[in-house]
Amino acid sequence: MEFRYQTEDGQLAMVQVERAGDGYRIAVSIGEEPARHYTVGVRQLTAGTVLLTVDGRRVQAYVAEAEGRRFVALRGRSVVLAPPLRPGKGRGPGAGQDALEATMPGQVIAVNVAPGEVVERGQTLVVIEAMKMELRVAAPHAGRVVRVACQVGEVVERGQLLVELAPGEE
């Protein structure tokens, strides 16, 4: 899997993740730097704190969410992860609706909404467990749930539709 993020200083970070036994092989390139390769184990310590074992060394990463974005601080560098939102895709929602999709493979451990429900911006709609972390899919704006396309216990793939959200008044 490949992910693209923007660092705090505006550089493009590309991360390639491949399962390797109980952990992962990860290649990271930031800006024009050549890719660095790592073997990584992941364990969630508390909400917002993850212990990574990177090439045998332990490193804590701190994760926070605000205004529909996820912020990760690790070894003095910060990354801003975009929300799992793709406006108006042809295969899914109708015009003006948002398709909230899984950003990585994982198992759905909570579905907090039902079709027709009115939600507020930032409200957690779905929680996915991936790489021993909980990933919360939050409403990017106030709106009405049009469709819930997942259920608790389901294993989802990256890009799989989770919830369709129609805009509402904020």
Image (spheres, rainbow, N blue to C red):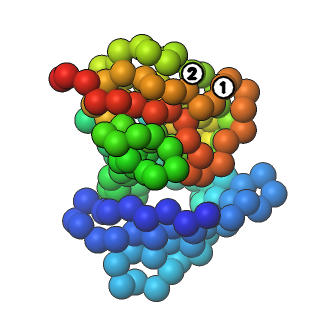
Q: Residue 150 at x, y = what percent?
A: 63, 30
Q: Tell me if 53 is positioned left or right of 72 in this view.
A: right
Closest to the observer, 81 or 108: 108
Q: Residue 103 at x, y = what percent?
A: 52, 48
Q: Is residue 66 visible?
A: no
Residue at the spot x=81%, y=57% of the render?
21
The answer to whether mark 2 and mark 1 are in CB contact below 8 A is yes
What's under tag 1, amino acid-wise?
Gln
Q: Which mark is residue 151?
A: 1
Closest to the observer, 112 or 164: 164
Instruction: Quarter of the image for the C terminus: give it.
Output: top left
Q: Which mark is residue 170?
A: none
To which quarter of the image does residue 109 belong? top right
Instruction: Quarter of the image for the N terminus: give it.
Output: bottom right
Q: Tell me if 62 is positioned left or right of 59 in this view.
A: left
Q: Residue 66 at x, y = what percent?
A: 28, 35
Residue at the spot x=31%, y=40% of the render?
96
Q: Is residue 164 visible?
A: yes
Q: Which mark is residue 111?
A: 2
- CA distance for labels 2 and 1: 7 Å
Q: Look at the picture and state if 10 lies above or below 144.
A: below
What's under tag 2, amino acid-wise?
Val
To which quarter of the image does residue 120 belong? top left
Q: Residue furthest right?
A: 21
Residue at the spot x=46%, y=52% of the render?
90
Q: Look at the picture and state if 166 lies above or below 15.
A: above
Q: Tell me if 169 is positioned left or right of 73 in this view.
A: left
Closest to the observer, 56 or 5: 5
SS assignment at label 2: strand
Residue at the spot x=39%, y=74% of the render?
30
Q: Earlier in the sequence, mark 2 or mark 1?
A: 2
